[in-house]
Structures are given as C-alpha cells and as structure tokens.
Amino acid sequence: MAAQAKEEGSPTTDTTSSAYDEAAAISSESQEHAIAALVSKLPTRQGWLQSLVLYNNYWINPLVVKSIMRLHTTFKPRRDDITLASNPKCGTTWMKALAFTITNRSRYELGNNHPLLSHHPQELVPSIEMPRDTNNNLKYLETLPSPRLLATHMPLSLLPQSSSIVASGRRVVYVCREPNDTFVSWWHFANKLGGKEHSTSDLESTLNMFIQGFSPYGPFWEHCLEYWRQSITNPNSVLFLKYEDMMSEPVKHVIRLASFLGVPFSTKEEDDGVPEEVVRLCSFEKLSGLRINQAGEIIRFDDIVFDKSASSEKGWWGIG
C-alpha cells in the first residue's frame, strides 16, 4: 500500500533528500522564498485537496513539506518533550484533551475552571507543523515552557532529528485507527475543510488514492508502521495505541497513558475515581456541547482555514 516512490519514472530518495540539505542551509531572512522555490522543483501528482509532491521518498502535501523544511531549520527538540502523533482523523483531538488533562492535573482541578472548558484542545496542544500566524512562523514553539506537550501528523522519519527521538528519553504517543473509518472521516472532513475552492476528488477516486498510499501525510500503513516498529524496539519512548481499544476501555487506557507519560495515578487517585473523571471531562458529550468548541477559527494553514465546527460534529469530535 505504501506509495513511496513507486510510480514509474519517479526519482529516487536522493533527489528529495538534496532538497532537505538545501533547506537546512537557508537563512531565516530568505527562508520562505527559498523553501517555496525548492518545493516547486519537486515531482508532483494528483492528490486530495491539492497536488502531492515527492519528498524524502514520500508523496505528501506540499504545505506539510514546507513546514517540515521550516522545522528542520528552527525546531530544537528537548529531552522532556511529549509528542502526540497520528494520521489525521485517528483520535488526535481526543488524545490532546486526555494528555493535557493527565499531565496538568496537579495544576488544574477537574472542575468548572478547567482550561478544556474554555479552550479547544487544538489550542492547548499545538501541532508542530501548524504555524500560528500568517507569516508561517514556527519559532513560537521555542517559547513554550518545558515540558512541552506537542502534536504532529508527520511520519516519524520526517520529524526533526527523528533519529534521536527514541534515544534521548523523549516520549511519543501514537494513535492508530482502523483505516476504513479513518478514510471515511477524513474524506468528509476534507470536503468540509476545503469548501468550494479546495474540493476533494470524488469518493471513488479519493479512495483509490488512499489505498495506493497517496494521502496528504503519506501512506497510511507506512505511517503507522514507522511508529509501531519503534514502540516494539523502544517501548519506554514510544507508546502505540489503537483508537478502537481506547474507545472500548477508556479508563484502562487513561491509566496506562498516565504511567507512560511519567505522571501515574496514585492509589488514592484511582480509589477516588480520578481516571474516570478525566474520561468524563474529555468525552464527546462534555466538550462538543461547549460554545467555545462550536464556532470560530482554530488555525489558518496557508489559505485553508481549520474551523472548530469541523471537529464538533458527532463522529468527528475527538477524531481530528
């Protein structure tokens, strides 16, 4: 299923790795123009909302490639970083809510003043490839206090300094979801996200691209397998979770997640039902009904707007 340079006549990895090497040497002053020029030279093919480009042996969204190039020149991983990773529509929003609540429960009581009741999870846990201003500036990531709780949809091999992540004590939590449900959710989301100017291909054509591995963040199974392999060889650094298992036994997985993140629940907390409170606070029923999660712009990625309402409809909340 992987679409890693499988098309006839596709260049080898050397072509796009040279683009990465050039990006690493770009000065901040001319970075955007230089990155745009590099991306424009990459091979292209049909994609979902827009064409895909071949970068480091992956067919991937060009907006993502630009962010990856920026990150490789500006992002500095820290030893205590926590990164939440997944393909899109596999549980990222829900995982952000759970991880934020678990790691910050000593700071915020699980009551009426909790940040989740006044902020969308996407605002509390930034995605490292998503700029937060119109200048595509990712330097704000360096201003966040440690330990940073971050998120990404990028394949493991394309993360900044990915080779050192599992060897440095940093923690990565990956959520995998059944591909059929992932695709259906993703396709509906992409249509709502794109609007008239960025409409997706028809369902059958888009499904064929997904099956062949042509997706905005690379081949679905290869994306999963990169993290899964690391979770087997480095279980203390990478936790691999299945969305369906989390849905069927949320309390069990909240307890497991807290332990992996280095903030295990005490016996008293478990006796007092704190894990159950975390699950209730982060539930669809609790958060989707909040006005703060029903309208407004979360973030603007180039000319595509991510709206809160796209994540607040039943079946999508907690799956972003």
Image (cartoon, grey):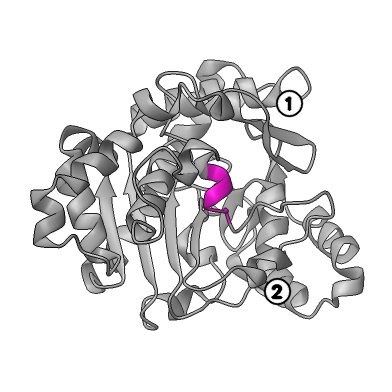
Residue bearing the label numbered 2:
74
**Place of residue 32 in the rendered image (x, y in percent of width and height, measured from the top left):** 86, 62
For image coordinates 35% across by 47% down, the residue present is 98
Comparing marks 1 and 2, which lies closer to the viewer? 2
Residue extent of the magenta highlight: 122-127
- Residue 193 in view of the camera: yes
Q: Which residue is at 72% across, 33% downward?
A: 305
Return the residue at label 1: 198
Residue type for callout 1 = His
Tell me residue 170's x, y (percent): 39, 75
Q: Quadrant of residue 277?
A: top left
Instruction: Say what secondary structure mark 2 lies in.
Output: helix
Residue 7 in sight from this viewpoint? no
Circles 1 and 2, Cβ within 8 Å, touching? The answer is no
Dot 1: what SS?
loop
x 17%, y 33%: residue: 248
* Residue 227 is a magenta residue: no
The location of residue 215, given as percent across then percent down, is 54, 40
Q: Residues within 10 Å of mark 2 (few under 14, many from 20)?
A: some
With 174 as the anchor, is 289 left or right in this view?
A: right
The x, y position of residue 19, in whole percent, is 73, 69
Locate residue 241 relative to residue 160 in the image: left or right. left
Q: Earlier in the sequence, mark 1 or mark 2?
A: 2
Give above or below for 67 relative to 296: below
Identify the amino acid type marked 2: Thr
Q: Quadrant of residue 45?
A: top right
